[in-house]
Amino acid sequence: MDAVDPPLVLVTARRGWGLDMLDRRATCPRRTVSVRIATVPLVTSLLESELRDLLATRLEVLEPGLSLVRCEFSLRDAPLGTRGRIDILARDRHGLWVIIELKRERSSSRQALHEIAKYAELLQRDKQLAPDRIRALVVSTDWSELLVPVSNMARDWSHDLRGYELHVGVDGRLSADRVALLPESPERYITPVHGIYLYASPRERDRGWRQIRQIAAEVGATNLLAADFDRVGALNAVVAHYGLYLGIGTVEPADVDLEPAEDECSSDPCATGHPAEYRALCGINARVRCVDVESAYPGLLGNLLADPDWEVTGYRGTGAFAGTNGVHEERDWLRMLSGNDRGDGQVTFVGSANPRIATRWRSFVEQAMNSLGGNPEWETLVRAWLERVARQPGDVDVTLRVYNPCDLVQTIVHGWPDELDRWQPGVIATAEFADGTRSVVQGMLCADGYGAPGLLDMVHVVYRDPIKWMTTRYGGVTWEYDQGLLGLLGLRHVLLEIVGDGPEFPAPEDERGLWLVEDGQSMRVSSDDPEKFTAAWQSLCYNGNLMTLRGFLAAHRHEVDALRVEYLSCMDVRR
């Protein structure tokens, strides 16, 4: 160390630093300590055992109310073939057991977390305690190697974990400061706050990108991701042929003014869900120079990719999404802008997880539920299925794909009849269990029987006319109307499940499960109970066949065709 060398001090004491420090009831071993402190600071010259004995007599410097149980508390588990000794075992003022692990030097501090985790597990087994009855304190004179790993472990560990920096004066006095552990590093991701900027030439687009970067930096949005897309067909249909699709990455709220301008649309859901990013986008839109600015949302870029008249030609980004960081590939950029792996668009979700990896599983379920927003039936059913598979023993590999447009009229206008599979809502999920069995689930819209005639009239009741439907789409509230329309038509969301373990899947002997919502609660009916299963199945059948959405629309073909013609005549839809 660079500190000035302290004077030479010779200390001789019995089990500590003087009789005034001696607690005769303490169970630390008695010994005579002779310490010579020469040309290094006093704190680095003490042996770890000497610091331990000194600390054991002054536990109140860590926390008031700590009482010593024993130093060098021995633990062993013969079946596991392991053992250990806790530096100091104490009880706190609430009666909890406290493991105190003491480290003196940087070189030994790296062992701390291994020992803490081992001792907590052994103590929990030895005394048959719940995890919340055990705490742990890491005490060290040097935190340069401890701060990062202890911070990480404290966030995810089931036991309370804290850190203290210990100070020993030349006179033997102890003091300790609680270490402020590092906060969790915020995730950098592309939020649902998107925008589209159209330009007359590639050169103008490049200039526009530089301008967007400058404005974004000024308003605190340093993480941007954009896709270039060019018009390659039907050129006369649009004025500007070169577009920039922009997604705003996470913004620290302190970096941007959150007070919206009076002329900004506060009804946008992003204004409340992502206020800092939304404010940044408003700042960009107010100053950017281009042919046109259009609103966008997660999933729209996927529509551009599917449109033969447009072609995505490249990606560019700043900050965490700079193209030169070498971390991501082109498919990652598309995934981030689509929001499919986070469910941000509340339309599409694609992801996989293992419920044994608890932290990722919680995020996976939350993101899946985001994608099912506006669809309470599927949200209830998919959550119930995920909870069921998570209860199975061992590792479970779960994959889930959701398409949840919550817009039956859009499905008909864009998908009927040839592309219905692409546009109709659907859920595909699989769970591979440790014993080799698997569950495969398909979610779909089914009808309660044939359904009453008057499909076109029902649509008019809900939307009045195509303009009303378009208005709800631009306002992002179509899902509220869609639920009413499905109810009038007798359409409901269901999950069909097959569970089996044979080499040929599915097989006749495999179990079938039918998931329905009754009175707001999920209900699973199994083919292992033939009577109940048959009754539930027949409620979704017409003439013995399952009445899927395709079958329902086919049964009302003339009204569906009339609806499609009416809406196409009022809007510019290019399939």
Image: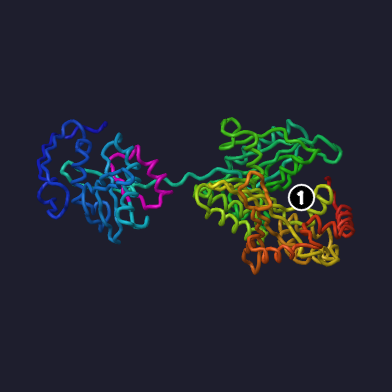
Left or right: where 236 falls relative to 28: right
Coloring scheme used: rainbow
Residue 261 in view here: no
Q: Quadrant of the N terminus?
A: top left
Left or right: where 20 falls relative to 552: left
Residue that carries the numbered disc 1 in the rendered image? 423
Vertical arrangement, residue 103 with respect to residue 203, above or below: below
Magenta region, residue range: 136-161
Toward the viewer: 10 or 452?
A: 452
Please, what is the three-letter code of the amino acid marked with disc 1? Trp
Residue 357, magenta (yes or no): no
Q: How many numbered dots are placed on residues in this image?
A: 1
Point 62% across, 48% down: residue: 430
Image spot of residue 275 (x, y percent): 59, 52
Toward the viewer: 525 or 471?
A: 525
Residue 310 in view here: yes
Image spot of residue 225 (x, y percent): 63, 39
Toward the viewer: 488 or 20?
A: 488
Point 77% across, 49% down: residue: 421
Image spot of residue 100 (x, y percent): 28, 48
Residue 156, magenta (yes or no): yes
Left or right: where 402 falls relative to 420: left
